[in-house]
Amino acid sequence: MKLLRRIPTPVWLLAPALLFVAAMALFPLGSALVLSFRQWRLTKSTEPGPFIGLENYTLLFTDDPEFLESLWATFVFVTSDVVATLAVALGAALLLRRAGRVNSLARVLLILPFVMSPALIGISFRFFLNPEFGIAQFLIGQVVPALHGKVWLADRTLAMAAVVASDVWHWAPYMTLVILGGLASIPAETEEAARVDGASAWAVFRDVTLPQLLPVLGIVLVLKTVFALKAFDTIFTLTNGGPGTSTQTLAYFVYHTAFNYYDMGYAAAAAWVLTALLLALSGYYLRLVFRKR
């Protein structure tokens, strides 16, 4: 009892949340880590098999072309998605920065794409790009004649572009609001002083606004990278990893291995490769947020 009394009150208040995190995150992660060192195919046994050490990890990187292709697809998707989202969000934030009724209404409407289910977004884009009745496919074909009549989801490059576009459409509004908050924290006097000195609008943005906005852009960059690495719902409903394996990212590879091939140990190893990437990025994100200025 004396030991319990020595525990500070804040710890007691945090205890329920810590227990919930341990039950919902730490325990599954630990179980998956142990499973990644074992052999377990559901087609052969309903119980985990013997420990095989690092064999699953060795096979992933040395004898599995599909896994290596998923790593490349993940790199292409994450890079394109993060760059496009950051560019769109920064441009939209700069346009909506000024006060006004139209801008205020636009800021409210920005949250609508973000609150939509990623699975629903994937299904919607699948209809939009349908070669027979898709409105987006028709309009794009009118603007770019070379794409007229193209079956987007049957082309490796266009399918990846469709996945990236759907994810940008989902996340860019939220990131725009984050960047708007960063722009609001920039002292107006610094930009006004630059304008008084005769600096152009581009020079003010490049030399005054952007340097002060870099910490916020860094956080947006890391956050979007984490979200892109975890992307699954949109890919599942839009392309199902196809055509072939062109849009099969690492997250989709884990699902495909576990629930199509029923190789749970191998899938756990692939999942921990993805987890390691996410933990590294999350640690960097925390350093950005909590570092001393």
Image (tube, rainbow, N blue to C red):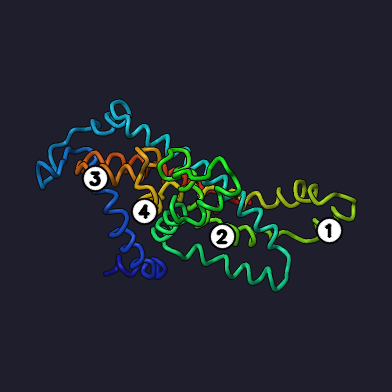
Residue located beneath label 1 in the image:
192
Residue 64 placement: quadrant? top left
Q: Which residue is drawn at the image coordinates 65% and 57% (left, top)?
A: 92
Check disc 1 and give the amino acid type: Glu
Q: Residue furthest top?
A: 62
Checking the image for residue 173, the label placed there is 2
Check disc 4 and report its element: helix, strand or loop.
Answer: helix
As shown in the figure, which amino acid type bears the numbered disc 4? Answer: Thr
| Direction from residue 54 to residue 200 in the image, left or right | right
Q: Residue furthest bottom?
A: 101
Coordinates of residue 250 in the picture (x, y in percent): 37, 41
**Mark 3 or mark 1, which has the lower sequence index?**
1
Closer-to-camera residue (151/16): 151
Residue at mark 3: 258
> Which one is closest to the eye, mark 1 or mark 4?
4
> Residue beneath label 4, please?
237
Q: CA distance from mark 3 to mark 2?
A: 33 Å
